[in-house]
Amino acid sequence: MKWIDRIPFSVLIPLALLLGLAPFAPQPHLWEKLRMLAAGTLVRPIDVFDLLWHAVLPVLLAVKAARWLRERRRP
């Protein structure tokens, strides 16, 4: 997991926002796919792949932020 620590926030934040929110209109794919998942209509393989594709960088950012915060709290 050390490779996550080597990715700078200055690179990861814009990429996570861009990929997580793309396309911007009419609604972001990630939001649409999460709504489909909650409704139980996320059944087609392409939709599952799309959810994973749009969520990978935001999830990576969350993991990096959690690791960074945990490391800062250590004495």
Image (cartoon, rainbow, N blue to C red):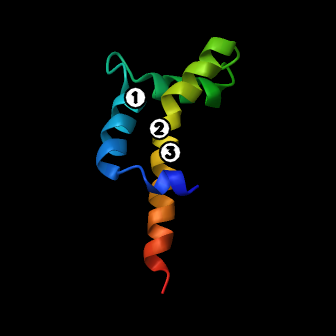
Query: Which is nearer the N-term, disc 3 or disc 1?
Result: 1
Label 1 element class: helix
C-beta proximity under 8 Å, tags 2 and 3 = yes
Please name the residue that numbered disc 1 is placed on. 19
For marks 2 and 3, give the CA distance. Answer: 5 Å
Please name the residue that numbered disc 3 is placed on. 60
Query: In the image, what residue occupies the spot 43% across and 54% down?
Result: 6
Query: In the image, what residue occupies the spot 63% across and 28% down?
Result: 37
Amino acid type, callout 2: Leu
For marks 3 and 1, give the CA distance. Answer: 12 Å
17 versus 5 height, above or below: above
Query: Which is nearer the N-term, disc 2 or disc 1?
Result: 1
The tag on residue 57 is 2
Side of 56 where 27 appears, left or right: left
Label 2 element class: helix
Q: Position of residue 13 (x, y in %)?
A: 34, 44
Query: In the image, what residue occupies the spot 58% across and 55% down?
Result: 1
C-beta proximity under 8 Å, tags 2 and 1 = yes
Q: Nearer the viewer, residue 59 or 28?
A: 59
Q: Residues within 10 Å of mark 1 (few under 14, many from 20)?
A: some
